[in-house]
Every structure is written in structure tokens, then in C-alpha cells.
Image (spheres, grey):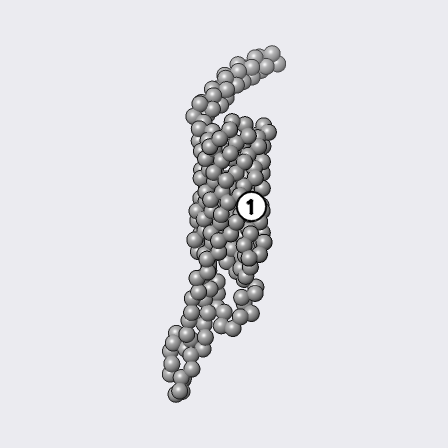
Amino acid sequence: MRYCILLLVAVVWKPTMGQSVNTDSTQSKRGISYFFSIQSGALIGDQVTFSASTIHGITLAKKLRLGGGIGFDSFKNSNTTPVFGSVSLDVLGKKNIVFIQSTYGCAPFAWSQSLKKEYGFDKIKGGEDFSVMLGYRITDGDVRIALLAGLKHQEIQIRYEYPAYYPWSSLFVPKEQAYNTQVITETMNRLAVSLSVGWR
């Protein structure tokens, strides 16, 4: 009985192994694989501030990488959390590679401790976010280490509310008219330098 069980396991296991090899072979021929990376570095402008992000996606034909990510960027008076899509293309080299990476998205979350102290400050809102970077990637097995440098663009909107004063009694003034509002759009363009560590 014991030998019958061993024989049955061997018969079932062998085709399974063959099927696994064929599947891997098919995926290899298609050239599609999963990747992820973690980047951290500096944003250089009127001050040097911190930036970090993580990107997950797929590699097509071993040269084109499509993915999505989330990050954290600090600026002089504000912080943002951008959500973005990413495209990366290998342009030179086989093992150690020169590549171009571009991201585009928006920052749904933004906050500022220093602006809260300003008179009339109401809220801050993130806007358009994109970057274009040139990188050099070193490969060691499935591990990828890259240095990147380029430009990063981020927009934010700051809303202020100031009490509206009337020469007559304000008892009957609607609440929405009791304040004057001002919205300031700030555009931050920075030189970005970062180190990326990833897998495949």
C-alpha cells in the first residue's frame, strides 16, 4: 500500500512539474514580469527637503516598465502625498542600464504646520504632480539599485478666509457672505535626486 501511494504521488507530481516549466517559459517569452521599487532622496530648491516613494508595476519586453505609486514630498511650507502613474524606458546598456522615468499624478493629501499660524488660513489642497528623471541602474540577480536625477513639479492651493465687515448690522448677513475668500496657487519646481532599490 505504501508503494502504491508513492507511485501515485510520483505520477501526479511529474506532470505538475512539467506544466510549471511550460508556464514559466511562456511568461518568459511574453516578457512580462512584476517589479517594485522604493525611492528616497532630496528635492533641491530654495531649501533642500525630503522625498520618498514606492512604485509597483509590470515590465514589458524587458525595457518598458509601467506602474503606479504613492509618495511623500516635503517642501518649505507644506507636505504632500502624491499618487501617480509611472513609465520607465531603458535606453542604453544590457546589465547596467541608463533609463528615463516619468511620473504623472496628483496629491490628494496636503498639509502644513507653518501655514496654520497665518491669519485667515483655512485649508491647503494638493494639485498636479509630475517628474522626469534620468537614471542609471545596476543589476545583481533580481535586485535593482539605481541613481536618478531630474525635475519635479508640484502644485498646491492655499485657501484663506477673512471676516467681511459691514457698516450696518451683520445679524442678517448669510454665513457664506460673512467671509471674503482668497485662493493662492503655488507651483514648486525642484531638482530631484534619489536612490532607488527594487526587485526585478
Q: Mark 1 is on which residue type? A: Val
Secondary-structure class at tag 1: strand
Q: Is residue 198 visible?
A: no
Q: How many marks?
A: 1
Whether residue 41 sits left or right of residue 177 in the image: it is: right
**What residue is shown at x 57% (from left), y 64% (from top)?**
113
Q: Residue furthest bottom?
A: 168
Q: Position of residue 196 (x, y in %)?
A: 57, 40
Q: Is residue 182 visible?
A: yes
**What residue is shown at x 40% (from left), y 87% (from top)?**
167
In the image, residue 20 sits, relative to residue 131, either above or below, namely: above
Q: Position of residue 74 (x, y in %)?
A: 55, 55
In the image, residue 21 sits, relative to residue 117, either above or below, namely: above
Q: Which residue occupies the foreground of this view, 173 or 82?
A: 82
Q: Which residue is mark 1?
A: 193
Q: Which residue occupies the foreground of this view, 8 or 121?
A: 121
In the image, residue 180 sits, relative to residue 30, either above or below, namely: below
